[in-house]
Amino acid sequence: MQVTEKSSPVRRRSFLREALAGGDQDFTVGSLSRGIALLAIPTMLEMAMESTFGVVDAFWVARLGADSLAAVGLTEGVVVLIFSIALGLSMAATATVARRIGEKDPEGASTAAGQAIVCGAAVGIATGMAGVFLAARLLGFMGAPASVIHTGSRYATIVLGGNVAIVLLFLINGVFRGSGDAAAAMRTLWLANLINIALDPCFIYGFAFFPRMGVTGAAVATTIGRSVGVAYQLSILFRGKTRVHLELRHLRPDWRVMGRLLRVGSTAML
């Protein structure tokens, strides 16, 4: 009994390390409850970081005044709509990749991941271009006074212009979760947020050799953080560090697979 009591904390620590490390766990065999827990722990930590970008921006921008803070809050309201598109595509990618992994079809999983990325990039670029041209109008449509539009239009333009990074960050993390490597998704959000946390005060207030950009600097830092996160995700996929190993051929449009992904994701978007 004494051995059990002493070994129980050790087993829990070992289990936690395994959950955070990720790797090549096979969730199609073994205990179902254990597999759920191994996926749930890093997923919860990942989701906790999803909203941190806006919180960190608001924290640093608050010192610039009410107009700057209002610009961040209103822009985040628009970004939530982009989240809905990204989340729908992410759920479709997770479901499709998970099915192929369960069928022991890594090639099918890689094809599904590649087509999901192509869809996400197309949607992100299209909405990003719209965001660049309509940023000031969107702020006005949401009730922002002229002073907020004047102060925050560049912030909104940069954040919304970087929609492709927002969409791909969500979507590729869905691929990771579908392949059973939720820890990679968690590490991606940690990396992106750490970069944002480090760069936010530098670009906003002009620390060291950084230019003082005010509220616009928060947008630059956030977009850089998200973009580095996407670059990290793609490096994992193309190096074959997970069950999904991407090659350039997987990115050639396959309209049949793409159509199936959009059908699955469309209801989730709504």
Image (tube, rainbow, N blue to C red):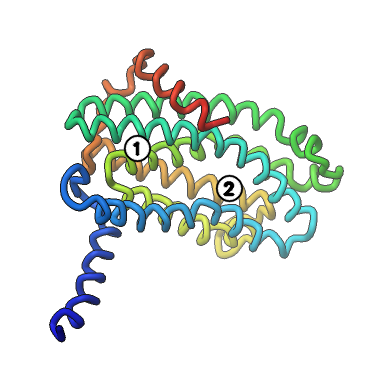
Give left or right: position of 126 versus 143. Answer: left
What is the distance, in whole Å, between disc 1 and disc 2 at their CAs?
27 Å
Q: Quadrant of the C terminus?
A: top right
Q: Quadrant of the N terminus?
A: bottom left
Give left or right: position of 209 versus 245. Answer: right
**Most distant residue in the top direction:** 255
In the image, is residue 51 above or below residue 170? below
Q: Nearer the viewer, mark 1 or mark 2?
A: 1
* Residue closer to the observer: 109 or 58: 109
* Residue closer to the observer: 177 or 171: 177
Total residue callouts: 2
| Spot occupied by residue 71 in the image (x, y as percentages of width and height) | 73, 48
**Nearer-N-terminus badge (1/2):** 1
Callout 1: SS:
helix
The residue sitting at 22% across, 35% down in the picture is 102
Q: Say the numbered circle drawn on residue 220.
A: 2
